[in-house]
Each structure stands twice: as C-alpha cells, then as structure tokens.
Image: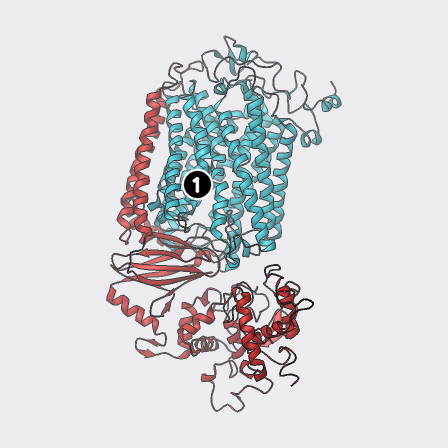
Amino acid sequence: MSFNFAPGAANIIQMTTLKLPGVLAAWGLPHSDAVTGPDVQFLWDFILGVAVFFTVLIVVLMVFFSIRYHAKTKNQVGDHGHTHNTALELTWSIIPLILLMIMFVLGFKYYLNMDTPPSGAYKIDVQAKQWSWTFVYPNGGISDKLYLPAGRPVRLDMTSSDVLHGFWIPRLSIQKDVVPGRVMTVWIEAKKSARMWLQCAEYCGSGHSKMRARVIVEPYAQFKKSVHAIADIWKQNGKTLSLAAVGRKLHITLGCIACHNMTGAPGGVGPTWKNLAGSKVHDTNGQVVVANYQYLKSAILHPGHLKVKGYPRGIMPNTFAAQLKKIAPNGRALDALIAYINSKSKYANQQSLPPELRKSSTTVQPSAKPKTAPVKASGLPAAALPFVSKGKVLVQTFGCTGCHSVTGASGVGPTWKDLAGSAVTLTTGKVVTADYKYLREMILHPGTLLVKGATAGVMSGTYGSMLSGPKHPHEKKLKAIIWYLNSLSDHANKASWPPGVGTKK
Amino acid sequence: MTTAEISEHIGEHAPIGGNYLNQGKGIKSWLFTLDHKRIGLMYLISGLTMFFIGGMLAMVIRTQLLVPNGLIFHGSYEAYKHYNQVFTLHGIIMVFMVLVPIPPGALGNFVLPLMLGAKDVAFPRLNLLSYYLYITGAIMAVVSTLLGAVDTGWTFYTPFSIQTETYVVWMVLGIFLLGFSSILTGLNFIVTIHKLRAPGMKWFRMPMFVWASYATSIIQVAATPVLGVTLLLLVAERVMGVGIFNSALGGDPVLFQDFFWFYSHPAVYIMILPAMGIVGEIITVFSRKPIFGYKFIVMSSLAIALIGFVVWGHHLFVNGQSAEWDAIFSFMTFFVAVPSAVKVFNWLATMYKGAISLSTPMLYALSFIVLFTIGGFTGVILGALATNVVLHDTYFVVAHFHYVMMGGTIIAFIGGLHYWWPKMFGKMYNETLGRITCVMLFIGINLTFFPQFIVGAEGMPRRYATYLPQYQLYMIASTVGAYIQLAAFLLMAGYLIHSLVRGKKAPANPWGASTLDWSMASPPTTGNFQEMPVVTQGPYHYDDMEYDGRLGGFVHVDPVPALAGAGVEH
C-alpha cells in the first residue's frame, strides 16, 4: 500500500483556494467549450434554481412548523379540523406539473439539437476497445489523441470491438455509449482552443478507470497540421524516424500499451513486451517456442493462434492486422512494431529482428524459406484449380462467409484464411492439424470437433445434408469447398488437400 | 400450559400473558414458524446482516477512493478488478438483498396484518417459503462470491457479463430466486389486503403504510417476472450462446438494458414506496394530527406505482435509443415527479397546526423529507434530456440514487424500525442516543453524497477504481462522511442491542398512535388480537387518547369500538 497523501494535500490547497469559488459561481456544472454548452447551462441553472427554491421552502417550513407547533405537553393534539383542502392540494400538484413540463420541453429541444449532427461536418472515426480509444482521421492518420478544430462541427462515428464503452467529454457537453455491433454517432463543435479529457463513462471491465484520452481543440489551421502530422507516422518534425521509433508511436496509438506494458511489470492483461523478442515463451501446452520475428508477426496478426501460458485467449482483438495494413500496406508498420519490441529486449537477435534491420553480414540468414515450408496457396496443383473456383461458388451459395471470413477478419466462426494445414487448438486443449479429414468432419458434423473459443451449436449441422446426395455425402462438392479452403491458406499442404487430385496424379 | 404444549400451538391462538417471542421455544419453533411477526423478524435479522456486509463493502470503496491511484487496490488491472468486484457486490447486496426485500419483508410482514386487524397474512406457508427463497438466493450469491466474485456491476450489462470469467451464472440464479421471493411476498400482501381487513376497515380507512405496501406489491408481482426472464436469458446466453444479447452473435446489448430496466426502474419504487408509507405514519403520529390530504397521498402512491412502469427508458438516454423514445421516457419521468411532490407538500401540511414532538422516529421522517427532496430534484435534472447526456453514468448519478436509496429508503426504514421497535420487542431504546444517531446519520449522508454531485458534474465517471487528481478533495470529504455513517450505525447497533437486554419495558402504545397495530400489548401475542377488532372510523384520530405517566404510553379516554382494549396492560 502506498500512502501518497502529500501530492493530495497540495491538490486540496490548490482546489480550495482556486476551484471552489468557481464551482459555486457556476452552480456546479463545469464550464463548457461546446456550442451546445450554453443551452445545457441554461437548463441546469433553471432546474437548479427551481430545486433550490423549493428545497429551501420545504426545509424552512419544516423547521418553522417544528418550532412553532412544538407540543408543549404529551396530551396536546393538533388541529383535527384541518385535514384536507382540495384547492390547495390541486395547486401544489399543478404548479410543479407546469414547471416540470417547461423543463421537459427545454430539455428535449436542446437535446434534439445536440443529437442531430449537422451536414457537412468533419468526420472522425472512433474505435473503442478494452481499454483504449483510437481515432482515425479522414486522411488515414491514426492517433490515441482526439484533435478537434475550433469553430467547426465534427461528426464522430464510434464503434466498439468488445464491450460497451461510454464516450464522455464533460467539457464539451457530450456523452454517448459505444455499443458493440452498432455505429454510434455524436457531433461536437468546440468554440475555442482547449485541452481536456475524454473518459470512458460506461463500465467496461478492469481497466475502465484508465480508459481515457486527451482531447485537443486547436484553431483550424493548427488542427490541419496536427492531423497531417499524425498521418505521417514515419516522420516527426520533418525528420524520418527509425523503424523502432515508429513502432514506439504505434504501441501507443494503436492502444497496444493498454495490455502490453514496456516496463516488465506483472499483472498486465497481455504479456509484457519488455525482453520479449528473442526470449523463450511457454505456450499453453507447455511447449517452449522462441519469440522470433515469425512468432511476433503471427501473434500480432492472428491473435489466438499462438497462446501464451497464463493469458486467456480471445481477449486481444484481431483487428490489428487490418489497422496495420491500413497504415502501411507493405507490412512496414508491423515491422516497425516488431522493431520496437526488439529495441526493448535483451534477448533480441537476428532471428527476432525484422528482415530489413538484420545485419547483412550475418552468415547464415536464409531469406528464402526452408524446403520443408508448407506449400503456398499458389502451389496448388493445376488440376485443383477448377475445384477451387467451384468451391468458391458453393461457399457463396451456402453463405459460409457470413460467419467465416476469407480475409482473416474476425467473425462468428473462425476465419478460413490460413486455416487449412494450420494447427488448431480444440476446446479439449488438444492441438490438431487442420488436414483434409479434419476439415471434412468440421463441415459435416459441426460441434464434434469444437475449436477453442467457439460455442457448440452456433454452426448449423445441416450442411452435411445440404451437400449430400441420396445416400452419402456429395464428395465432389465437399472436396471443392475444401480445395477452396486450401487456396486461402499459406499452410496448405498435401495432408490438407482433398485426395484424388494432385496427390495421386 | 407447558412448553411442549405451547410448541404444538404455534400459529394458533396463544394464551394471555405470553407473546409471539416466547410462545414457542427452540430453534425449530423459529425455523418452521408460520407467524408473520417471526418471519418478519427473521427478515429483519437477515436484512440487517446483509446491510452490514454491503455497508462494509461501501467502506472499502470509500477507503480505496481516498487517493487518486487507489489506496487499497492499485497498480494493476488485477487490482482494479478486485475493486470492481467490491462495488459490484455492494450494489447487488444492497439492491437485491436489502432495499427491495427488507422493507416489505421485515416491516411489512410485521406490521401489515396488525394494521389490518388480521391474525396473519393470507398465506402463512407461502410467506415462509418467500423467506427461504430469500435465504437460498443469498446463499447462492455468497457461493458465487467465493467461487469468483462477479465484476459486472449490479446491472449485469452485456456483452461484458457474457465475457467475464467470474461466476455470473451462480449470482444471476441467486437473484432469480430472490426475485421469486419478492413476487410471492407481493402476492401474499395483495391477497391479505383484499381479503383479511377487519370488519369496518374500508379501503379508505386503511393506514398509509398499508396503501404504500399495496402499491409496492403490485409492482413486485407485475415487474419482477420480467427480471426473472431477463436473468434466465442471460444464463442461456452464457451457457448456450443463444445470441440474444451478445453483439458478437448478432444479438443486441441494448435489448438487455431495456429488459433489465423494465424491472429495475419500477424496483426503485418498490424501494421508495414503503419508505413513503412509513414516513406518512410517523409524521401524523408525532404531529398528533390526522394526515393531510389522505386521498391525495393514497392516489399518489398508486400513481407512482403505475407511472413507474413507463419511465425505464431514461436509463438509456445515451445508449442509442431513438430521440422519439428519449422524449417519451423523459416526459413520463417528469410526470412521475408530480405525485412525489404532492406527498412532500402533504406531509408538511400535516405538520401545520400540529402538536409536534421531535422524537427519534420523527427526526428520521424529517431527515427523509430533506434527503428525498434533494434526491428527487437531482432526479429531475437527470430526467431532462439535455442535462442528462452531460451527467449520465457519473458520480452525479451515484449521488442522486444514494440520496434516494440511502437518504430515502434506508433512513425511512431505520425510522420505521425505531417507530415499531417497542411493538416488535416490547422494549424502549435510549431516546437521547437515538436522536444523536439520527443527526449523525443526517450529517454523514450529506457529507458522503453531496460532494459526489459536484465531482460528477465536474467530470468524474462512476465505477472508477482510480481518478484524476483534481477530484480528490471531494472524494476525501465523501469518505469522511462514510466513516461518520459507520460510527452512527455502530452506535445504533449498540443502543438497540442494549435495549433488548436492559431496555425499559414498552407500553402498548408509547407514541399515541391510532392505527390498529398499537391496539394490543407490546410485543403482541401470536394471534395478534384477543378478539376481532371492529373499525368505525378513519385510521388517524388523536383526540380520544391520553398520556398515562404510569404506563409511559397512551390510553383511550373515550373508548371507540375499533380500539377496545387498546392500552390496557395485561
């Protein structure tokens, strides 16, 4: 336990001398920098005025009656003739009703304005996740800070990749929950330059109270410069940054830091990145793997494939692949992140560094993959190609892609990208290879082989019969689909190919 | 009659000289009792135990928030998770195990049949079942806490409640049972009020507290099943992945919120209506004057119960509900404020030209009026749409509902406990300590929760394990207030326990109340009334009784048939 009262004491002195008079003057609501602020302030003042008037009236009457009509003896009784007065009672029903209706109408009127984004507003996308905010600007720039232009309306389209979050900037008089599965929209127009906090207002788990972001309102010209600078993550103040320095920025802006610290402190949601690169990592099966470049790459792009002991699966969103690709389609953003991880590791070595940072003089550093590497999708036998296209058509017909993406994006079911031939962890904890037999079984009898993280009964068991002929499964259709699956996978190999084509010929 | 013979007569008419506490001895005579008073007492003891646990969790919360980084849980997400578990359990215990079941379960059970002139509630066995469902639900909550305390907040919002690895299913099933207990109690009370009124007890001769219990019971019976269904769906969601509330499976998290608040907002009125009933009783008795505007107060209770069903959407103003729905719910929310205002003015008018004595129960009733007024008006600020979106999910909301729940329900409940204490146990408590404690609680509650209004408006969200340093002054004030409350409650426990052991014997009618619950000896016999009372007038009339210094209580000077035998010592 740390008893850090000393800074607290300084705060108290500061607040009692500076803040409290201001609070009293403004009736409690903080100063708002939003164009909608005065409306809210007016309504607040009005209701609070009425509230204070009636509260004081009630307390004064109560105290007055208690003294004036205080019983002098135990046997004294009150005035029994005074037990109701319809006119009086109607008065104190109707007056509050009228006042309340005024409050309702004002509240609704102002709210409609606050809730309806003006057309032509500057658009920023907001991505909320446990426990960080990411802001995506129209030029593709990604930042953990919300830059806003003063004097111009901004429309924020907000999504959540996990649970409910609450977008709240009190000083801009705006709050909206970010509901997963929906796009939530708010608009803001700040009047002048200011700095403030955005805090998560809807409870979202362990890191809820740390889920906040800096809001920076700037004059429009300065705002444009800031957003331009964000878009170019490779530079700072006009100078090109090292790959690791870019990675350091991404670590913060993509929100990796929320779960992966760089200090080595235990207790994080994900493993610390300090001394990770090049180190030995225990996976859940007790196996030890070395966190080399390939490992780190795979862990970032396909979270859940590689499971580290002690860290539950399914926490890390698999949205980073798309985000990194958006920043740099050639994979350099990913390399930057890995370079940064290497820069903080005492175990970093040639194998853990991104290829472009490896010393060219190093002796054995084969850039080409070993001969035993899995056959690439392009390596499918030519005879299989008609099956692939037929399988693709079937997949679209059956609507498989509704749940299984072919791009690596997350969905209800596991993605089919890189599935065939890969190692799959089942709910039983067993690791199996997604070979032909496995894939066939999964399609015909979903639920028997349940992939870890999946829920039984989500996938319909009717695909077998849909694919079936009168007596047995329609092998041709089934094979076509599995060929298509193989075409999507970097791990595809002969074991995952359907028999008949390529293998026998 | 021997003890053994008495044991056989549990639930039957009891002999003169004994009372419900000593008619029937041994643990079994309590565990299998069908006497509404004993069941009420068991609710009281269980409820106060849960209140103590919930209160100590609140002390942990307040202690944690003394410093911005957290005094107890700090430095890691794992630590914050523990804090989240603490505030979740605090909320669940206080809402589902104290505020909802205990005012009806303890005071309602004890007082309602006495006020109606009945021997017991309509279904005594069902009443015992309600209690055991309550206990089972509470035990399941304890088990889930030991297995892995939930960290969802008492609202169980999806999808977090589907994803968290804590024991949500156990806890939710426990609350499901608590809900059943609540439904059965409500049903029992409705039938009791309809069928078991003494001869001459017309509807508009029933005391305020009976009306309030009636309105409460309607909500319990009509709203709680929705909670049950919602919780079962949540269990199905977790266990089977049905995808109703889980956005990852195409479900809608906001639907859960709609379902949840369809119960949980009316539940607020389950909590506050009995409190209002208690306050009405206390104010008329200690003003020695019939309640002002009896019918207006009765109608306002029913209005609150009914309108209370259509305001739940104000919990969803920032959750993507359409602006049209926002408007309707905001309108209804303002509308429900009117009957509450009517009650407050009527209570004040009751005091006008009364003969007021500021005894402990009266001090609690007056505290209630002040605290409830503050809680009510801040509710109006939250009901207005434009101000709501600035204050939603902040400490302003926390302060608002604590003023209503703590300053309203709990204060009224404690006031009612002091009011009926002599009747329940036949002992008087120390009046001076009672008043001091009430003043301490009043100060403590205001010091705890008023700074939270300011800190919320200033920008502090609720359910935060850590906070920005600029809020620390308010947080410290709040914590100091909480410790004052703790001291007050410990003092109260001290003098109440002392009164049980050493307290002065209570007369039949120490306060000079005119309702039937004071017409028999304190404590009552198992069968309540020696002979069936006959009611000939309204519930409140104080000009027909006189204080008898020898008894320390009031006796009737002009015996009215309804109160024949009142004040007569055995």
The C terminus of chain A lies in quadrant? bottom right
The chain coloured cyan in the image: B
Residue A23 appears left or right of A383: left
The vertical placement of B222 against B287, above or below, is: below
**What tint does the image give chain A?**
red
Chain holding disc 1:
B
Q: Position of residue B311 (x, y in %)?
A: 43, 40
The percent coordinates of residue A388 (x first, y second) are 56, 77
Is residue B75 toward the left or the right of residue B143 in the image? left
Measured as percent of width and height from the top left, residue A230 is found at 34, 70
Residue that badge 1 annotates: B401
Colour setting: by chain
Q: Amino acid at mark 1?
A: Phe
Which is nearer the eye, A227 or A248?
A227
Dividing the picture into quadrants, the one containing residue A103 is top left
In the image, taking residue A347 as reference, residue B66 lies left or right, namely: left
As drawn, which residue projects farthest toward the front? A470
Visible in this render: residue B244? yes
Nearer to us in this view, B18 or B255: B255
Q: Give the image location of residue B449, x and y in percent.
A: 41, 42
> Badge 1 local density, few (<14 within 10 Å), some, or many (20+)?
many
Secondary element at image label 1:
helix
How many numbered markers are drawn?
1
Q: Specify the farthest residue to the top.
A: B558
Is residue A286 visible from the viewing direction of this image? no
Q: Which residue occupies the foreground of this view, A352 or B222? A: B222
Residue at image point 58% right, 81% down: A384
Q: Nearer the viewer, residue A42 or B312?
A: B312
Look at the picture and state if A365 lies above or below B267: below
